[in-house]
């Protein structure tokens, strides 16, 4: 394979609840407004054609810069994981995706779908575009709010050739009827499914019946911290309920379970506690450093705090997300940038992270 190859542009798009599409979830920058599943075949949109042509010529693609950066910093990326068949949910079935080749037929075989923005959480790193529970806060902060619930069931899209479906929201389990409708349009014995859920709900028996017919199912639980700090980061969740559901999912034999968290300034000192807890359960936990909102990046911590954390992570396993955290903590930042935006959110939500992460609060108070 070439230096810049990725199989996704021949097989995959990411679709939001509005119908708007992007090449993938790691894409940097916007995509044209007319790249929409309601406007025709997004796999052959001019942007996708250009991406494929550049890769066939072994030229870098600007929108793929995040993967290139992660490869330089950590040695891995979603691009490499997908190409080598170790991406969660695809596994050895990656051979069902056509390779990077001039004669390969672009077709929707791998879809990442945000079913709707209906959600029962209002996570700090999220916003109204992906959570209806954000509407109240967004209004107080002067942010634009969508009209009602944004929902896209892909009614005009052929799903028969899908071999991998990544289903997320909002909170997708709020839509059992729509999930069933989508699954009933797929060839389940040939489909690998990844479900992303915020761990506040469990699937219905009707959904589980269909899950058991899948070739492979990976359930990814979005959890950011062990304990009440998760309630601060994912407002609307309750830690004891989340922990109970984590244990319930870990006991099911019809899915492979993973946990995924986002590393922000708020939890950068303690995400390994969740990782180690999951490891004791026999559940793989992975993390990524937040890309946005910008103010939540760990780089904005005071220099002395960052230095203490760097010394802490020198003794941790050099997992890819630990390496990414070390890189992030070595970047210049502005404490004022964080404090300004954090104070705005605290005023609206009437809460402070210091009440949920005493260890980090004490580290900051000593600077």
Image (cartoon, rainbow, N blue to C red):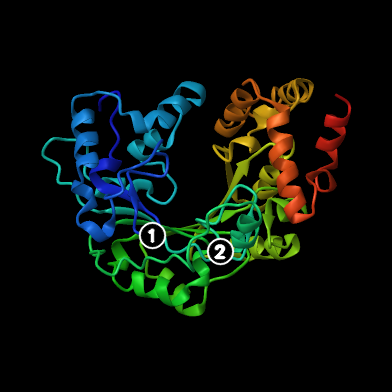
The vertical placement of 112 against 268, above or below, is below
The vertical placement of 181 against 263, above or below, is below
**Which of disc 2 and disc 1 is earlier in sequence?**
1
Quadrant placement of the C terminus: top right
Can residue 12 be spotted in the picture?
Answer: yes
In the rendered image, residue 279, in percent from the top left (x then y), is placed at 65, 46
Q: Nearer the viewer, residue 134 or 307?
A: 134
- Tell me the CA gap for discs 1 and 2: 14 Å
Q: Quadrant of residue 338?
A: top right
Q: Quadrant of residue 300?
A: top right
Q: Which residue is mark 1?
A: 18
In the rendered image, residue 322, in percent from the top left (x then y), is placed at 62, 31
| Residue positioned 60% across, 59% down in the render | 134
In the rendered image, residue 214, in percent from the top left (x then y), is placed at 37, 65
Q: Which residue is mark 2?
A: 132
Q: Quadrant of residue 158?
A: bottom left
Total marks in image: 2
Quadrant placement of the N terminus: top left
| Residue positioned 23% across, 51% down in the render | 42
Which disc, if any, is residue 110?
Answer: none
Element type at marker 2? helix
Question: Taking 231 as reference, is 62 left or right?
Answer: left
Q: Residues within 10 Å of mark 1 (few under 14, many from 20)?
A: some
Question: Taking 362 as reference, is 38 left or right?
Answer: left
């Amino acid at each position: 394979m070439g230096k810049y190859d990725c199989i996704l542009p021949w097989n995959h798009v990411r679709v939001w609840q509005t119908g708007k599409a992007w090449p993938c979830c790691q894409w940097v920058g916007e995509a044209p407004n007319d790249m929409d599943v309601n406007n025709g075949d997004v796999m052959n949109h001019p942007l996708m054609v250009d991406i494929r042509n550049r890769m066939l010529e072994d030229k870098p693609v600007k929108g793929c810069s995040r993967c290139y950066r992660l490869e330089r910093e950590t040695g891995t990326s979603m691009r490499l994981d997908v190409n080598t068949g170790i991406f969660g949910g695809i596994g050895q079935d990656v051979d069902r995706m056509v390779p990077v080749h001039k004669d390969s037929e672009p077709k929707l075989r791998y879809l990442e779908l945000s079913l709707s923005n209906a959600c029962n959480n209002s996570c700090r790193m999220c916003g109204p575009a992906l959570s209806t529970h954000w509407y109240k806060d967004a209004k107080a902060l002067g942010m634009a709010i969508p009209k009602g619930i944004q929902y896209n069931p892909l009614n005009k899209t052929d799903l028969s050739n899908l071999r991998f479906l990544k289903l997320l929201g909002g909170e997708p389990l709020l839509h059992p009827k729509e999930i069933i409708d989508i699954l009933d349009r797929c060839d389940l014995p040939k489909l690998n499914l990844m479900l992303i859920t915020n761990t506040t709900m469990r699937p219905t028996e009707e959904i589980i019946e269909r899950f058991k017919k899948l070739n492979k199912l990976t359930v990814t639980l979005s959890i950011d911290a062990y304990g009440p700090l998760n309630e601060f980061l994912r407002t609307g969740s309750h830690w004891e309920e989340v922990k109970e559901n984590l244990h319930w999912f870990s006991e099911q034999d019809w899915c492979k379970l993973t946990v995924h968290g986002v590393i922000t300034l708020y939890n950068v000192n303690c995400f390994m506690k969740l990782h180690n807890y999951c490891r004791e359960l026999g559940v793989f936990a992975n993390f990524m450093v937040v890309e946005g909102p910008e103010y939540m990046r760990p780089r904005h911590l005071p220099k002395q705090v960052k230095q203490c954390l760097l010394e802490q992570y020198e003794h941790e396993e050099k997992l890819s997300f630990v390496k990414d955290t070390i890189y992030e903590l070595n970047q210049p930042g502005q404490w004022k940038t964080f404090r300004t935006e954090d104070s705005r959110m605290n005023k609206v939500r009437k809460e402070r992270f210091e009440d949920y992460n005493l260890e980090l609060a004490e580290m900051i108070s000593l600077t």
